[in-house]
Amino acid sequence: MNLPSNHKWSFSTIGGVKRVNLENGNDLRALPLLDQKLWTALSCPVEGLEIDANTLQLIDADGDGQIRVPEILQAVNWLLDLIKDPNELFQQKEALSLNSITDSERGKYLLETAKIILSNLGKSDATMISVEDTSDITRIFAGTKFNGDGVITEDASDDSQLKQLIVDIKLCVGSTIDRSGKEGINDALMQDFYGKAEAWWAWQQKAKTEAASILPFGENTEVAYATYKAIKAKVEDYFLRCRLASFDPASKEVLNQLNSRIEAITQKDLTSIISEIETYPIAKVEATPILSLVNGLNPAWEAAVSLFKTCVMDVVLGSKEEISENDWRVIVSKFAAYEKWKGSEILTTLASLGEEKVAFALRLETKESLAKLIALDLELSAEVDAMAEVDRLVRYHRDLLKLLRNFVTFFDFYTAGIKAIFQAGTLYIDQRSCDLCIRVNDMGRHNAMVSFSGMFLLYCNCVSKSTGEEMLIVAALTNGDIDNLIEGRKAIFYDRKGNDYDATIVKIIENPISIRQAFWTPYRRVAKFINTQVNKFASDQDKKVDQLVTSKITDTATKADTHAANALAAAPVAPAPVAAEAPAPAFDIGKFVGIFAAIGLAIGAIGTALASIFAGFMALVWWKMPLAIIAIMMLISLPSMIIAWLKLRKRNLAPILDANGWAINARATVNITFGNNLTHLATLPIGSNINFNDPFKRKGMPVWQRLLIAAFLIGIIIYSLIRAGVIHLNLNYL
């Protein structure tokens, strides 16, 4: 982008700071020339702002969650290279006109891509494209076979066998989600399937090429092997016992001694303990290792041995009714090759497909057809990337200027009727609405920073009853009074979308709100102090009375119990002498005279001072009296008002935003006038009818108040007449 060489900037003083004005496309083109020291912000977070977070993530090139000046400039340059007239951005339209895209090579490609998107959405005749059109990739590719992600579904082929193969691959090795939202397979899944299919096929073919040794019983080998395996351990145990009996004839009786075990089960239902009987030897041990297959067998093994005889013995050794150890070795050798082959079995779900389907999948042309479908899909990856760029273009066109007005300059914040992107909503509390509400991202940083803002802040925990969403906000109170604001008080918060939240004050940072509020602050403090002291005094006196009454009752009960016990006790011997009670301390009149004298002096001094003040006040000319009262009040309130005025001039939003992850480069002053626009007090609508007849208002004034006011007014009149010489008072006579 060519930068203007002699661009003239326009600045405005806003919030006590000179801020640049972004007024037209030339200002945007020249933005890289603007000194960063003149930018209002140097960094802002991606999350927690009232602007599309997806747009901010696209601008955040390094993905660190913060947007900085170079990333802003990069986004501006990219956008201005693709639109014809940058002045169009200041119209802040929700949709981008296709005619606004430049005629450059890249612009033409994105224009064609935009038309493809609209066509896929059934909007072939549309001349505008919006974020809603470009953001839902699933909807864009819902009706397409290929979408550039390398994932194919069964819809990618018109061949029924290939369709079924794709379904079978998904069943055997899993699937992944296609951009269309359907389940499909990619090259990795296809290679996984073929690796397992080829291994399983080779294992199956080995059994066919070496069938004589591996399948000695033909297609019945698996059944025969199962009957052999069922009795193998018991038969080999029997022959081993026979060899022991042959080695030591005396051991034959021990090996066959089952009397005690059988006696233990004779009282039981033998059909219910077959598993225990199975642990006994398969037959009675003999010195000669011959096992009858029809007689003398353990009842629990008769059926298994009979099945073995039919499936194995009769086939290998003929119709023999007994088997020797040598015969058994012949049987074992028959299954050796099968056992080895079975041990190398490829355990995979491909077996459920059957040999016919696996054979079709392993055909070279089948594999090439699948690979070709995946390649065709990947050929559109560039088109999909272009769709992502169209989405970026539409988002930048809609949101970038809004970000600039809240980053380069705080235009939105200082413009009436517009809210900045960091303003989360409105808090309603105590007959006022607070528009300066900001989400709190890090309470720890807020605790360290917000004291420098100089603003009266309410931290509120907000919970949505409808969605359960919870957030912590800080609301700046810049108008009204603070009498009824305490931690725990409830309020209502509305976010920028109009959703309501139950808000609870969890923390208050106190600072002046207005000069009017500062005027009454000293009197509130005095009233609060007096109220606290009165409550404390009343509480202390109540405790003293309670303790006195309790102690008297306890002493009386104790003495009564003691007298009763002494009266009932029978004492054969004379009671021991009881020590006399210590006499109560004598009344120290000197001590109390000193106390009363001190109190009298204090009251006298206070009375003298008040009398002097009153006499001096009454000595004034009548028109000076109101001025004296005003002067006294100003003497009390002026320091507080001056301090408030100084603080209100310096209220600064920057520390609050800094605590939220911003890097503010200039003051964001919230002076008195601007603060009044951020907190709105309740006012009656113009033209409202008001009924002043309050049915619950106190009727009239109590008599004592009327007499007190009358006496005060009469006293002032008499004193004024005496001062004027109208009335002469003979003090000597009095």
Image (cartoon, helix red, strand yellow):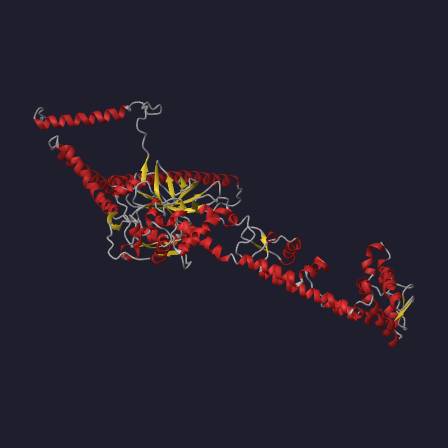
**Residue depicted at 58% across the width and 61% down the height:** 187
Which of the 4 image quadrants contains residue 714? top left
- Residue 244, image x and y in percent? 85, 74
Q: Quadrant of the N terminus?
A: bottom left
Q: Nearer the viewer, residue 139 or 489?
A: 139
Image quadrant in which you'd find residue 429:
top left
Q: Is residue 643 left or right of residue 156?
A: left
- Depth check: give the residue in front, 420 or 537: 420
Q: Nearer the viewer, residue 415 or 246?
A: 415
Q: How many marks?
A: 0
Tell me where residue 212 appears, x and y as whole percent: 81, 69
Of all residues, the one furthest to the left in this rendering is 725
Residue 82 visible to the viewer? yes
Residue 468 position within the rendered picture, expressed as x and y whole percent measured from the top left = 48, 44
In the image: residue 79, left or right of residue 269:
left
Vertical position of residue 467 compared to residue 665: above or below = above
Measured as percent of width and height from the top left, residue 595 is found at: 25, 42
The residue lying at 40 percent from left, 56 percent from top is 105
Rendered residue at 28%/46% (across/down): 670
Q: Quadrant of the C terminus?
A: top left
Q: Is residue 432 above or below residue 257?
A: above
Height in image: 425 above or below 626? below
Image-quadrant location for residue 625: top left
**Residue at the bottom extreme, as displayed:** 247
One can see residue 268 in this view: no
